[in-house]
Amino acid sequence: MSLTLTVDGDRWRRHLCSVAEANPGLVPVAKGNGYGFTVGRLARRAQWLHDQGLGGDTLAVGTYDELPHAAQRFHGDLLVLTPWRPFGSALETDPALAPRLVHTVGRVSDLADLLARQPDARFVLERVTSMLRHGLSARDLWTAARMLHDHPRARLEGIALHLPLAQGTHLSEVQRLMNDVVAAELPEGGTGATTVWVSHLTHGELDRLRAAYPDFTIRPRIGTDLWLGDRGALRVTSTVLDVHPVERGDVFGYRSRTAPKSGHILVVTGGTAHGIGLEAPTGGSSLRARAATLARGSLDAAGFVRSPFSIDGKQRLFAEPPHMQASMLFLPHGAHVPAIGDEIDVRVRFTTTAFDRVLVS
């Protein structure tokens, strides 16, 4: 009686291996809810990839608070994607992790503070991109390079580029950013001056980048395409907990709503505690996406909201807004009514869903 993610293990593992083989220098990303799998489970799988000889010597996590979930399950280096700041959880890490920990630095003042606290710190310098998320300007990168010449113990691991998800090629932007990297004249001790960690580049873009800069090591950081790239290997199901026949006007639910017509009320596993019914803003900008948003708004106003739960291949309506660990669905008269204990399919956004059980075959 759970919201369950069932994974076709053989198919999923084949996909992971194919992605790793196609991306030399792969840095798996395990952050947030672990793309629905949990950070700990993905850390173990990243270690498995490494043990298969498929790279993965470094695992990227999102925040310093996620380190404990990964450190005991993955034995390589740990890159924290959130920039280091001289406050909060960045200053509360286990000292035993220091040799494995790679910080991300996006401000010159933070670099100075980090090296004052830990002269032999390991870090990547993040160059700001058109995302305008975090990072150093070209001038800041040059300033950081000059600073590093005065800190011979500092361990620069490379330059990080976090590019937008928008469609279209990123190569012109990457070329401009790479020119800044070359011009910065970073210290040449180790490989940090010629290593670039990148996100959101296609295979073709990565190949062209490597060809254009053969003296550089390109390390792609991949999360979604790695863990969720083969959706056919993943199935999410909910369990039917109760079935109640209703007639038009019958009262039901937390909010004492009335049935719009005869049919059945289904109580199924999966509610707001799992992320069901919680929606992040959409990134869709096409006319079709906007029309869909307007249509959903009209349904909301009328009290009829399509749920992510499917029965006989059709998404069914919420009878009322979902609650903590369960949802109520309305099935009109004549629709197939599943039995108590049956499983029904659920369409979810993996990065916002917490599953009760993850079953990998």
Image (tube, grey):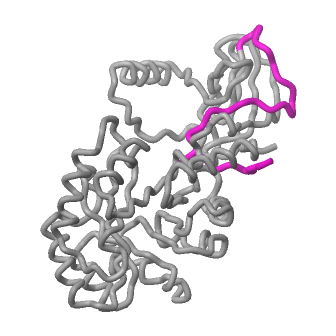
Residue found at x 48% / y 78%: 101
Query: Is 25 displayed left or right of 264 in the figure?
Result: left
Provide residue 191's location: percent of width, then percent of height.
36, 75
Q: Is residue 352 visible?
A: no
Q: Quadrant of the N terminus?
A: top right
Q: Quadrant of residue 213?
A: bottom left
Check if residue 355 falls in the magenta segment: yes
Residue found at x 34% / y 78%: 156
Q: How many marks?
A: 0
Provide residue 142's location: percent of width, then percent of height.
16, 73
Query: Is 360 displayed left or right of 341 in the figure?
Result: left
Residue found at x 55% / y 24%: 305
Provide residue 308's location: percent of width, then percent of height.
62, 30
User: Main SS type for the magenta part?
Assistant: loop
Judge by depth and name the residue closer to the eye, 33 or 127: 127
Residue found at x 62% / y 36%: 231
Q: Residue furthest top?
A: 334
Check if residue 347 falls in the magenta segment: yes
Judge by depth and name the residue closer to the eye, 240 or 144: 144
Judge by depth and name the residue closer to the eye, 154 or 54: 54
Height in image: 72 above or below 212? Answer: below
Provide residue 91's location: percent of width, then percent of height.
42, 83
Q: Is residue 26 visible?
A: yes
Q: State the extent of the magenta-drawn residues as a range.
A: 332-361
Judge by depth and name the residue closer to the eye, 204 or 319: 204
Height in image: 212 above or below 263? Answer: below
